[in-house]
Amino acid sequence: MKVSVVRNILEANEAIAQKNRKLFKEKGLFTINLMSSPGAGKTTLLENTAEALKDKLRMAVIEGDIQSSVDARRIAKKGVQAIQINTDGGCHLDANMIQNVLAHLDLDNLDLLIVENVGNLVCPAEFDIGENVKAMILSVTEGDDKPLKYPVMFRESAVLLINKIDLLPYTNCKINNIKKAALKLNPKIKIFEVSCRTGEGLENWYKWIRQQTKKK
Ligand SMILES: Nc1nc2c(ncn2[C@@H]2O[C@H](COP(=O)(O)OP(=O)(O)O)[C@@H](O)[C@H]2O)c(=O)[nH]1
Ligand SMILES: [Mg+2]
Protein backbone atom coordinates (compact mmCIF):
# COMPACT_ATOMS: atom_id res chain seq x y z
CA MET A 1 0.00 0.00 0.00
CA LYS A 2 2.66 2.45 1.08
CA VAL A 3 4.74 1.65 -1.99
CA SER A 4 1.91 2.42 -4.41
CA VAL A 5 1.17 5.74 -2.69
CA VAL A 6 4.79 6.80 -3.09
CA ARG A 7 4.73 5.70 -6.73
CA ASN A 8 1.56 7.71 -7.40
CA ILE A 9 3.12 10.83 -5.89
CA LEU A 10 6.21 10.45 -8.06
CA GLU A 11 4.14 9.78 -11.19
CA ALA A 12 1.95 12.84 -10.59
CA ASN A 13 5.10 14.90 -10.04
CA GLU A 14 6.69 13.58 -13.21
CA ALA A 15 3.66 14.59 -15.32
CA ILE A 16 3.90 18.21 -14.12
CA ALA A 17 7.70 18.20 -14.44
CA GLN A 18 7.33 17.23 -18.11
CA LYS A 19 4.96 20.17 -18.64
CA ASN A 20 7.46 22.53 -17.00
CA ARG A 21 10.28 21.09 -19.13
CA LYS A 22 8.27 21.53 -22.34
CA LEU A 23 7.51 25.14 -21.47
CA PHE A 24 11.17 25.91 -20.63
CA LYS A 25 12.20 24.38 -23.95
CA GLU A 26 9.63 26.43 -25.90
CA LYS A 27 10.94 29.59 -24.23
CA GLY A 28 14.59 28.68 -24.88
CA LEU A 29 15.37 28.77 -21.18
CA PHE A 30 18.21 26.83 -19.54
CA THR A 31 17.23 25.65 -16.06
CA ILE A 32 19.40 24.38 -13.21
CA ASN A 33 18.12 22.65 -10.07
CA LEU A 34 20.77 23.49 -7.43
CA MET A 35 20.94 21.15 -4.46
CA SER A 36 23.10 20.64 -1.36
CA SER A 37 22.92 20.24 2.38
CA PRO A 38 22.12 23.41 4.39
CA GLY A 39 25.04 25.82 4.47
CA ALA A 40 27.14 24.30 1.66
CA GLY A 41 27.01 27.63 -0.19
CA LYS A 42 24.09 27.57 -2.64
CA THR A 43 22.96 31.14 -2.06
CA THR A 44 26.53 32.45 -1.96
CA LEU A 45 27.20 30.73 -5.29
CA LEU A 46 24.06 32.35 -6.71
CA GLU A 47 25.03 35.79 -5.38
CA ASN A 48 28.39 35.44 -7.13
CA THR A 49 26.77 34.08 -10.29
CA ALA A 50 24.25 36.93 -10.35
CA GLU A 51 27.04 39.50 -10.10
CA ALA A 52 29.15 37.83 -12.77
CA LEU A 53 26.47 37.01 -15.33
CA LYS A 54 23.52 39.38 -14.93
CA ASP A 55 24.83 41.76 -17.58
CA LYS A 56 25.71 38.93 -19.98
CA LEU A 57 22.49 36.95 -19.87
CA ARG A 58 18.96 37.37 -18.59
CA MET A 59 18.57 35.39 -15.40
CA ALA A 60 16.13 34.72 -12.56
CA VAL A 61 16.23 32.63 -9.41
CA ILE A 62 13.60 30.62 -7.56
CA GLU A 63 14.47 30.11 -3.90
CA GLY A 64 13.16 27.12 -1.97
CA ASP A 65 13.22 27.10 1.81
CA ILE A 66 11.14 25.64 4.60
CA GLN A 67 10.54 29.15 5.98
CA SER A 68 11.63 32.78 5.44
CA SER A 69 12.56 34.89 2.44
CA VAL A 70 16.14 35.56 3.53
CA ASP A 71 17.71 33.96 0.45
CA ALA A 72 15.41 35.67 -2.08
CA ARG A 73 16.32 39.01 -0.53
CA ARG A 74 20.05 38.19 -0.81
CA ILE A 75 19.64 37.52 -4.55
CA ALA A 76 17.39 40.55 -5.16
CA LYS A 77 20.11 42.75 -3.63
CA LYS A 78 22.36 41.64 -6.49
CA GLY A 79 19.87 43.00 -9.02
CA VAL A 80 18.39 39.67 -10.13
CA GLN A 81 14.72 38.72 -9.83
CA ALA A 82 14.20 36.13 -7.10
CA ILE A 83 10.98 34.38 -6.13
CA GLN A 84 10.73 32.67 -2.76
CA ILE A 85 8.83 29.42 -2.24
CA ASN A 86 8.23 28.27 1.34
CA THR A 87 7.55 24.56 1.68
CA ASP A 88 6.25 24.90 5.27
CA GLY A 89 8.17 21.91 6.52
CA GLY A 90 8.57 20.07 3.20
CA CYS A 91 12.13 18.84 2.64
CA HIS A 92 12.24 19.44 -1.14
CA LEU A 93 10.65 21.38 -3.99
CA ASP A 94 8.33 19.57 -6.38
CA ALA A 95 7.23 20.28 -9.94
CA ASN A 96 3.86 21.67 -8.86
CA MET A 97 5.47 24.30 -6.60
CA ILE A 98 7.58 25.46 -9.53
CA GLN A 99 4.60 25.51 -11.92
CA ASN A 100 2.66 27.64 -9.41
CA VAL A 101 5.21 30.46 -9.41
CA LEU A 102 6.06 30.56 -13.13
CA ALA A 103 3.41 33.22 -13.76
CA HIS A 104 5.63 35.64 -11.81
CA LEU A 105 8.45 35.26 -14.33
CA ASP A 106 8.73 36.80 -17.78
CA LEU A 107 9.81 33.55 -19.43
CA ASP A 108 10.01 35.11 -22.90
CA ASN A 109 12.76 37.38 -21.67
CA LEU A 110 14.94 34.96 -19.74
CA ASP A 111 17.95 32.82 -20.72
CA LEU A 112 18.71 31.19 -17.39
CA LEU A 113 16.60 30.06 -14.44
CA ILE A 114 18.33 28.66 -11.38
CA VAL A 115 16.27 27.00 -8.67
CA GLU A 116 17.85 26.79 -5.21
CA ASN A 117 16.30 23.69 -3.67
CA VAL A 118 15.68 23.14 0.04
CA GLY A 119 18.92 22.33 1.89
CA ASN A 120 18.97 18.56 2.17
CA LEU A 121 21.22 15.90 0.62
CA VAL A 122 18.43 13.34 0.23
CA CYS A 123 14.89 14.17 -1.00
CA PRO A 124 15.53 16.98 -3.54
CA ALA A 125 17.38 14.52 -5.79
CA GLU A 126 14.29 12.33 -6.08
CA PHE A 127 11.91 14.98 -7.41
CA ASP A 128 12.12 16.14 -11.00
CA ILE A 129 10.99 19.77 -11.28
CA GLY A 130 11.42 19.97 -15.06
CA GLU A 131 14.98 21.29 -14.97
CA ASN A 132 17.57 20.74 -17.72
CA VAL A 133 20.22 19.70 -15.23
CA LYS A 134 20.64 19.03 -11.57
CA ALA A 135 23.75 20.55 -10.02
CA MET A 136 24.96 19.96 -6.49
CA ILE A 137 27.38 21.54 -4.06
CA LEU A 138 29.42 19.68 -1.48
CA SER A 139 31.59 21.83 0.75
CA VAL A 140 34.89 20.45 2.00
CA THR A 141 33.79 20.99 5.62
CA GLU A 142 31.13 18.29 5.19
CA GLY A 143 33.69 15.51 4.81
CA ASP A 144 34.93 13.47 1.89
CA ASP A 145 32.76 10.44 2.74
CA LYS A 146 29.50 12.07 1.59
CA PRO A 147 29.33 10.49 -1.89
CA LEU A 148 29.44 7.09 -0.19
CA LYS A 149 26.69 8.01 2.28
CA TYR A 150 24.36 9.97 -0.04
CA PRO A 151 24.88 8.38 -3.46
CA VAL A 152 21.57 9.33 -5.09
CA MET A 153 22.28 13.05 -5.39
CA PHE A 154 25.73 12.40 -6.84
CA ARG A 155 24.24 9.96 -9.34
CA GLU A 156 21.50 12.38 -10.43
CA SER A 157 23.64 15.51 -10.76
CA ALA A 158 25.29 16.58 -13.99
CA VAL A 159 27.54 18.96 -12.06
CA LEU A 160 29.31 18.78 -8.70
CA LEU A 161 30.76 21.96 -7.22
CA ILE A 162 33.22 21.23 -4.44
CA ASN A 163 32.99 24.47 -2.44
CA LYS A 164 34.91 26.19 0.36
CA ILE A 165 38.31 25.05 -0.91
CA ASP A 166 39.72 28.09 0.95
CA LEU A 167 39.03 26.09 4.13
CA LEU A 168 40.92 22.95 3.04
CA PRO A 169 43.92 23.59 5.34
CA TYR A 170 41.59 23.47 8.35
CA THR A 171 39.90 20.17 7.50
CA ASN A 172 40.97 16.57 6.96
CA CYS A 173 38.99 16.47 3.70
CA LYS A 174 40.77 14.96 0.71
CA ILE A 175 39.31 16.37 -2.50
CA ASN A 176 40.57 13.37 -4.44
CA ASN A 177 38.44 11.07 -2.30
CA ILE A 178 35.33 13.12 -3.17
CA LYS A 179 36.20 13.15 -6.86
CA LYS A 180 37.01 9.45 -7.04
CA ALA A 181 33.82 8.41 -5.25
CA ALA A 182 31.62 10.82 -7.23
CA LEU A 183 33.06 9.68 -10.56
CA LYS A 184 32.57 6.05 -9.59
CA LEU A 185 28.86 6.75 -8.96
CA ASN A 186 28.51 8.98 -12.00
CA PRO A 187 31.36 8.84 -14.54
CA LYS A 188 29.93 11.80 -16.51
CA ILE A 189 29.64 14.21 -13.58
CA LYS A 190 31.40 17.51 -14.26
CA ILE A 191 33.39 18.68 -11.25
CA PHE A 192 34.35 22.26 -10.35
CA GLU A 193 36.56 23.02 -7.36
CA VAL A 194 35.58 26.47 -6.10
CA SER A 195 35.60 28.94 -3.28
CA CYS A 196 32.61 31.25 -3.19
CA ARG A 197 34.56 33.24 -0.57
CA THR A 198 37.71 33.98 -2.61
CA GLY A 199 36.21 33.44 -6.08
CA GLU A 200 38.77 30.75 -6.94
CA GLY A 201 37.52 28.40 -9.67
CA LEU A 202 34.24 30.24 -10.28
CA GLU A 203 35.25 31.36 -13.78
CA ASN A 204 34.97 27.74 -14.92
CA TRP A 205 31.42 27.52 -13.56
CA TYR A 206 30.42 30.77 -15.31
CA LYS A 207 31.97 29.56 -18.54
CA TRP A 208 30.07 26.27 -18.32
CA ILE A 209 26.75 28.12 -17.75
CA ARG A 210 27.38 30.38 -20.72
CA GLN A 211 28.12 27.38 -22.95
CA GLN A 212 24.85 25.74 -21.88
CA THR A 213 22.72 28.84 -22.43
CA LYS A 214 24.23 29.32 -25.90
CA LYS A 215 23.22 25.78 -26.84
CA LYS A 216 19.55 26.55 -26.05
N1 LIG B 1 34.90 30.05 3.92
C1 LIG B 1 33.90 29.92 3.04
N2 LIG B 1 32.65 30.16 3.43
C2 LIG B 1 31.66 30.05 2.50
C3 LIG B 1 31.92 29.70 1.16
N3 LIG B 1 30.73 29.66 0.49
C4 LIG B 1 29.79 29.97 1.39
N4 LIG B 1 30.33 30.22 2.61
C5 LIG B 1 29.65 30.59 3.85
O1 LIG B 1 28.84 29.47 4.26
C6 LIG B 1 27.66 29.92 4.90
C7 LIG B 1 26.45 29.29 4.24
O2 LIG B 1 26.34 29.77 2.90
P1 LIG B 1 24.97 29.84 2.10
O3 LIG B 1 25.31 30.31 0.74
O4 LIG B 1 23.95 30.60 2.87
O5 LIG B 1 24.57 28.29 2.07
P2 LIG B 1 23.22 27.57 1.58
O6 LIG B 1 22.48 27.20 2.83
O7 LIG B 1 23.67 26.34 0.85
O8 LIG B 1 22.47 28.53 0.70
C8 LIG B 1 27.68 31.44 4.81
O9 LIG B 1 28.15 31.96 6.03
C9 LIG B 1 28.65 31.72 3.67
O10 LIG B 1 29.30 32.96 3.79
C10 LIG B 1 33.27 29.47 0.77
O11 LIG B 1 33.62 29.14 -0.37
N5 LIG B 1 34.22 29.59 1.76
MG1 LIG C 1 20.49 29.24 0.78
Image: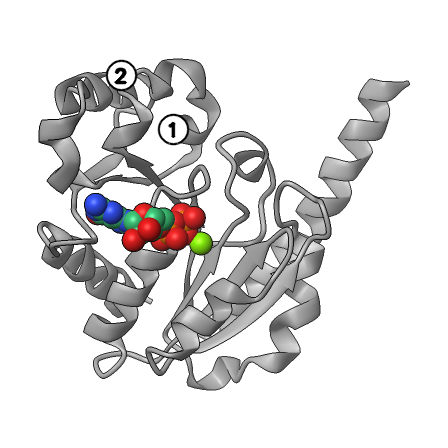
Q: Where does residue 205 sit, x and y in percent of width and height?
A: 19, 54
Position of residue 163 in the picture relative to residue 1 (left or right): left
- Work out whether mark 2 precedes mark 1 in sequence or the reverse, and give the earlier one: 1
Q: Residue at x 13, y 20 (%)?
A: 176
Question: Which disc, if any, is residue 181?
Answer: 2
Q: Quadrant of residue 92?
A: top right
Counting other residues with Cα less than 10 Å from the Cα at mark 1, is it few (<14), some (14-19), or many (20 or more)?
A: many
- Mark 2 crowd level (few <14, some 14–19, many ≥20, 10 Å Cα): some
- Residue nearer the viewer, 215 or 78: 78
Query: Given contact means CB atoms under 8 Å apart, are the residues at marks 2 and 1 in contact?
Result: yes
84, above or below 144, in the image = below
Q: Check residue 69 in the rendering and tell me which mark sits there, or answer none.
A: none
Q: Is residue 134 left or right of residue 211?
A: right
Please indicate whether residue 40 sits to the left or right of residue 121 in the image: left
Q: Nearer the viewer, residue 35 or 106?
A: 35
Q: How many marks?
A: 2
Q: Is mark 2 within 8 Å of ligand 1?
A: no
Residue at x 29% of width, y 71% of height: 50
Q: Is mark 1 within 8 Å of ligand 1?
A: no
The residue that disc 1 covers is: 154
Residue depicted at x 78% and y 38%: 9
Q: Secondary structure at mark 1?
A: helix
**Residue 213 sits above or below residue 109 on the image:** above
Mark 2: secondary structure: helix
- The kind of residue tagged 1 is Phe
Q: In this view of the protein, which residue sits in the foreground, 4 or 205?
A: 205
